[in-house]
């Protein structure tokens, strides 16, 4: 469902990052379902194209969500982890993170649009929620 099976052990080793970033053992109990994930392009105020990641997700729990933290994984055209540069100029490899404080009632759909500067990004392989906050002050964690 999330495309996480395409992230191989070899890819994880190539990334040389903490295995926690790929920890999806508890994904079946996630209160958030990823509806879609894509790169989008929008024009800025100068008329230049800017690239974003847009991830849509649905509250499939019985509680009102007050915040969602997401991760996503991208590859280049060769199926290899890509390089990303965030707004601060820091270079990371393939794993992106974002959060949204939007309130979502049960059954509602939300979205996160995140500016990323991909050096070689070609394909958004997977996206998943790793932490979700609820209006009753409880928090679901992927671990």
Image (spheres, grey):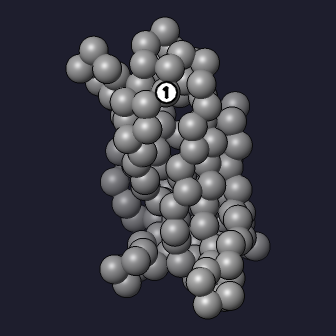
How many marks on residues? 1
Q: Which residue is mark 1?
A: 104
User: Where, quadrant-wise, is the N terminus in this rendering?
Assistant: top right
Q: Residue at x 53, y 50 (%)?
A: 112
- Quarter where residue 97 is shown: bottom left
Q: Is residue 119 visible?
A: yes
Q: Nearer the viewer, residue 5 or 32?
A: 32
- Element under disc 1: loop
Task: Locate residue 57 relative to residue 76 in the image: left or right.
Answer: left
Residue most toward the right?
77
Q: Is residue 71 above or below residue 66?
A: below
User: Where, quadrant-wise, is the C terminus in this rendering?
Assistant: top left
Residue 96 x %, y %: 47, 59
Q: Is residue 79 above or below residue 55?
A: below
Q: Is residue 55 above or below residue 31?
A: below
Q: Residue at x 34, y 80 (%)?
A: 88
Q: Nearer the viewer, residue 28 or 7?
A: 28
Q: Is residue 125 above or below residue 114?
A: above
Residue 32 x %, y %: 53, 27
Task: Locate residue 116 relative to residue 40 in the image: left or right.
Answer: left
Q: Residue at x 34, y 22 (%)?
A: 134
Q: Nearer the viewer, residue 34 or 6?
A: 34
Task: Locate residue 93 relative to residue 51 in the image: left or right.
Answer: left
Residue most toward the front?
45
Q: Is residue 80 visible?
A: no
- Quarter where residue 40 is shown: bottom right
- Within 10 Å of disc 1 (Cα), the crowding (few <14, some 14-19, many 20+) is many
Residue 42 x %, y %: 68, 72
Residue 22 x %, y %: 46, 45
Task: Locate residue 76 relative to residue 57 in the image: left or right.
Answer: right
Q: Residue at x 47, y 49 (%)?
A: 71
């Amino acid at each position: 469902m999330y495309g996480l099976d395409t992230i191989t052990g070899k890819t994880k080793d190539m990334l040389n990052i903490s295995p926690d970033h790929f920890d999806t053992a508890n994904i079946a109990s996630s209160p958030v379902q990823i509806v879609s994930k894509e790169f989008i392009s929008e024009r800025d105020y100068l008329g230049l194209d800017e690239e974003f990641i847009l991830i849509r997700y649905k509250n499939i729990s019985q509680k009102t969500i007050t915040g969602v933290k997401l991760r996503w994984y991208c590859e280049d055209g060769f199926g290899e982890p890509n390089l990303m540069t965030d707004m601060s100029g820091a270079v990371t490899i393939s794993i992106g993170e974002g959060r949204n404080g939007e309130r979502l009632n049960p059954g509602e759909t939300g979205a996160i649009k995140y500016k990323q500067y991909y050096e070689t990004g070609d394909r958004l392989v997977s996206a998943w929620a790793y932490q979700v906050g609820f209006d009753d002050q409880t928090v679901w964690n992927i671990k």
